[in-house]
Image (cartoon, grey):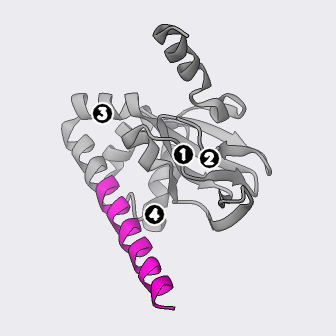
């Protein structure tokens, strides 16, 4: 298979889950709800109303019904999301390909940051438990923010690094407890 054909197939497969969900519109539609979430989301704790309005312009809003997959383990996608309403279950396949529940998250949670940043396949599958509304920030939109609004881009990047660092510390702690048993 030619490189161009293979790359075309990968791009076509990219963001498969978003193509199956109801697209509501640009993030500005729910900018106020995102702003109201600041007290409930660690990610947005240092963001101003102006920051949220600028960020919302770069996001798209989607809705998933219960049972719909939002992120599929193994897919190569280029977006992260912010849960605005609803609940999402996160599961991971074990070595026997059995789905193992990891956790569930609700409004204010972010998902998919690692794959947006590093372009690697999705680590787990995320499925809507309730009717779920979420905002999507793609890698291209993030690059555009960094270039056009560097202070906001820096703020987002610092939040992402801090969030991923906290998750790594928690995972390391869990691993240590597991090894001590």
Q: Tell me if residue 90 comes above or below residue 25 in the rendering.
A: below
- Disc 4 residue crowd, few under 14, some 14–19, many 20+, Cα 10 Å: some
Mark 2 vs 1: CB contact within 8 A: yes
**In this view, the mark in front (2 or 4):** 2
Q: Where is residue 165 in the image (x, y as percent from the top left)?
A: 32, 64
Q: How far apart are marks 4 and 3 (CA)?
A: 21 Å
Whether residue 138 is visible: yes
**In this view, the mark in front (2 or 3):** 2
Q: Which residue in the protein does label 1 denote? A: 122
Q: Which of 22 and 174 is in front in this view?
A: 174
Which residues, given as a range, are shown in magenta? Answer: 159-181
Disc 1 secondary structure class: loop
User: Which label's residue is closer to the chain start, 3 or 1?
Assistant: 1
- At x 54%, y 42%, the residue is 135
Q: Position of residue 140 (x, y in %)?
A: 39, 28
- At x 24%, y 28%, the residue is 148
**In this view, the mark in front (1 or 4):** 1
Magenta-colored segment: predominant secondary structure? helix
Q: Does the magenta stretch include residue 76?
A: no
- Disc 3 residue crowd, few under 14, some 14–19, many 20+, Cα 10 Å: many
Q: In this view, does 88 lie to the left or right of 81?
A: right
Q: Position of residue 134 (x, y in %)?
A: 59, 46
Q: Where is residue 146 in the image (x, y as percent from the top left)?
A: 25, 34
Q: Which residue in the protein does label 3 denote? A: 145
- At x 41%, y 74%, the residue is 170
Q: Does the magenta stretch include residue 171?
A: yes
Q: Distance between the residues labelled 1 and 4?
A: 23 Å
- At x 44%, y 67%, the residue is 39
Give residue 89's quadrant in the image. bottom right
Q: Which residue in the protein does label 4 denote? A: 41
Q: Distance between the residues labelled 3 and 1?
A: 23 Å
Q: Which residue in the protein does label 2 denote? A: 73
């Amino acid at each position: 298979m030619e490189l161009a054909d293979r790359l075309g197939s990968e791009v076509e497969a990219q963001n498969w889950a978003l193509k199956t969900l109801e697209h509501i519109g640009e993030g500005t539609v729910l900018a106020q709800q995102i702003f109201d979430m600041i007290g409930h989301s660690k990610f947005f704790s240092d963001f101003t109303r102006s920051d949220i309005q600028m960020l919302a312009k770069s996001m798209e809003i989607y809705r998933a019904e219960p049972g719909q997959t939002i992120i599929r383990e193994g897919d190569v996608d280029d977006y992260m999301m912010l849960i605005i309403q609803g609940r999402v279950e996160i599961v991971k396949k074990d070595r026997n390909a059995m789905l193992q529940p990891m956790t569930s998250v609700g409004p204010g949670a972010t998902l998919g940051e690692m794959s947006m940043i590093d372009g690697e396949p999705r680590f787990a599958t995320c499925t809507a438990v309730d009717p779920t509304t979420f905002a999507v920030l793609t890698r291209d939109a993030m690059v555009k923010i960094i270039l056009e609004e560097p202070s906001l881009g820096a703020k987002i990047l610092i939040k992402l690094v801090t969030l991923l660092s906290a998750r790594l510390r928690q995972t390391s702690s869990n691993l240590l407890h597991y090894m001590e048993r």
